[in-house]
Image (cartoon, rainbow, N blue to C red):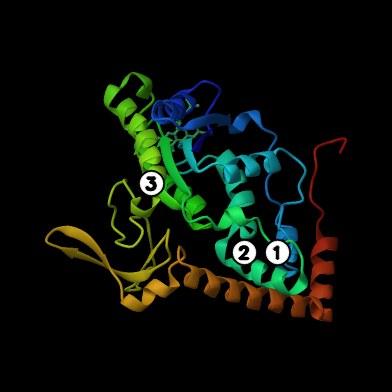
Amino acid sequence: MKIIGISGGGKNGNNDAMCREALKAAKEMGAEVEFIRLLDLDLKPCNGCVACVGKIMQGKNPQCIIKDDFPWLDEKILEADGVIFAMPIFEKGAPAVFKIIQDRFAGPSHDRGMLTVCRMISQKTGNEGPDARLFRDDKFLSFMSIGGSDWATRVSADMRLFALVPMWKTIDDKVFMWSKGIVTEDEKVQECHQVGVNMVKALKDPANAKFMGDPGVCPHCNSRNFYLENEAAKAVCEVCGIVGEIKVVDGKIKFEFPEEQLKHAHDTLSGKLIHVDDIKKNEGALAEAKKSAKYADRMAGYKTFLQASLPAGR
Ligand SMILES: Cc1cc2nc3c(=O)[nH]c(=O)nc-3n(C[C@H](O)[C@H](O)[C@H](O)COP(=O)(O)O)c2cc1C
C-alpha cells in the first residue's frame, strides 16, 4: 500500500508538517509513504493548448506536452494507492501551485469521461489509449487546508475537484481556519493524524470506504458551496453540479433536487459523458467558426489593434 503526501506550503511550514503527520500515521499502520513538496518542483501552468484533447480524439495516451516536472508528479500520483494533499489557504481558496497541478491533472487529460471516450477510440484506431491506472475505483484522495483566519470558504470546493475529475473517492476534507499555530494545537494535529489513519482504513477495505468529512449541505457530494443566481429559484452545487433548491427546514439549510439530476452529476460517468458531448459540440462550433472569413478578419483585427506588452529586453 503506497500513500503519498503532497504539500503546497512553504519549506518546512505548517502544511509540510501536517502532511507529514498524516503520513506518519499511515506509516505506523504499515503503508509505504512518500512526501512531495510542490514548491520544490518546476511546474508550469496549463496554457490551454488542448494537445491532450487532440490525443484523446485519436485514442492516444493524452499526456501533456509541456516540459517540466509534471510527468514525474503525474507518475507519482498514478502509482500511489492514496494521495493526501495539504494546501495553504490563499484568498479563501487553493493556492496557485495547487491550481497549476489541478489544471494539468484534473483537466481533460485525466477526466474519466474523456478517457472513457479515448479508450473506445483506441479500440478502433489501435493506438495505446489512456493509462489503465486512471480507471481505478479503489483509489482515494484526502484534502487538508490550513489558513490563518476565517477566509476559507472556497478552498474545499477548489480541492474536491481534483478527485471529482478522475472519479476517485474523497475520504477526508479538512479545512483548518485560524490555524497559524496548528503544530502546537494537539486536537488539530490529532485530526491530521486521523486523516492518515482513515486513508489506510479506506485502502484496506475499499468496498466500504466512505467520506469521513463534514456532512456539508449537498446530500450527494457533501459540498458546502453553491452557485446562486439573482432572482432564480435554483441553486447549483459547485462541486457535483446538481441543480436543486435551497430550503430552510427546522432552522437548517437543506439542498433538495429531483432524482433525475443524479444522471447529470459531475462525479458520475453519465454526467461526465454528457459533459464530453457538450464539449464536442462546442469544439465543433469553434472549428466551424475558424473556417469562416468573419473569424479570420476579426482575429486579424484584434491582433493588429494591440500587441501584448513585455518587460524591456524581451
Ligand atoms: C498570499 C497569501 C494569501 C493568504 N490568504 C489567506 C486566506 O484567504 N485565508 C486564510 O485563512 N489564510 C490566508 N493566508 C495565510 C496562509 O494560509 C498561511 O500563511 C499558510 O497556511 C501557511 O502555510 P505554510 O506554513 O505551510 O507555508 C494567506 C497567506 C498568503 C501568503
Which badge, 1 or 3, comes first in the chain's sequence? 1
Position of residue 136 relative to residue 301, above or below, is above
Q: Local crowd at mark 1 within 10 Å, few (<14), some, or many (≥20)?
A: many
Determine the residue located farthest toward the top in the rendered image. Answer: 184
Circle 3 residue? 171
Q: Which mark is residue 150?
A: none
Position of residue 37 relative to residue 66, above or below, is above
Position of residue 175 relative to residue 46, above or below, is above
Please report contact status of discs 1 and 2: CB closer than 8 Å, yes or no.
Answer: no
Report the amino acid beneath label 2.
Answer: Leu
Q: Secondary structure at mark 3?
A: strand
Residue visible at 42% across and 74% down?
A: 263
Report the amino acid beneath label 1.
Answer: Val
Whether residue 151 appears in this view of the structure is: no
Residue visible at 84% across and 80% down?
A: 293
Q: Quadrant of residue 302?
A: bottom right
Q: Which mark is residue 115?
A: 2
Circle 1 residue? 53
